[in-house]
Image (cartoon, grey):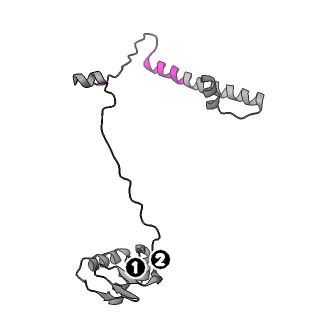
Amino acid sequence: WTAREDRLLRELVAFRVPWSRMSISLGNRPIEEVKKRWDYLRSGRAQSAEFGVDGVFSTDGIAVGNPHLKKFARTTQPEPKPERHVSFADPLTDDEEEENGSSHPPTTKKVYYIDEEFSLEDVVMLHNIAAKWERDRWLAISTRFNDITQRKITPEQAKSVVDN
């Protein structure tokens, strides 16, 4: 690395030029090599006030001058992340439970199917057929409505209008 390349690297970093463009400006050096050199320069091992192409660099690598590099600089600053305020509370407690200090764990309703004529697979199949029939029913209703009125409504729209 030459002193001129170090100065150019400092200027490019000061103007927030992307690493890919810095790599090209520095003779197509690999981006990782450019980053390593910047870490070396920034770490203080090569700290001193230096004169750049059009200005003076401070010891932290910020350029003073060279307005020609502004066209390569990032124009927008990264947006700061909004501050989050989080609180945790049990939303399912009522006043009585809070006073007693006791709460009951939620219960899961279990449904057991016992039938001598139909197996569980038969019942599941019947439910699937009924669900398909329900979809086909609303498709038939919306199609008939569309034929009569020359409008286009979906089966979901027909169902929501009838259900409400």
Q: Nearer the viewer, residue 140 or 5?
A: 5
- In the rendering, at what x and y percent does residue 74 appear? 45, 71
Q: CA distance from mark 1 to mark 2?
A: 8 Å
Instruction: Choose top left, top right, bottom left or bottom right for residue 58.
Output: bottom left
Q: Which stretch did the figure color magenta?
A: 105-129
Label 1 sits on residue: 12
Is residue 121 magenta-colored?
yes
Look at the picture and state if 89 lies above or below 9. above
Q: Amino acid at mark 1?
A: Leu
Residue at 35% across, 52% down: 83
Q: Nearer the viewer, residue 129 or 53?
A: 53
SS at mark 2 in the image: helix
Cβ–Cβ below 8 Å for labels 1 and 2? yes
Asked whether residue 146 is in view, the answer is yes
Instruction: Choose top left, top right, bottom left or bottom right for residue 138.
Output: top right
Total numbered labels: 2
Classified by dominant secondary structure, the portion drawn in magenta counts as loop
Is residue 152 magenta-colored?
no
Label 2 sits on residue: 72
Look at the picture and state if 76 lies above or below 63. above
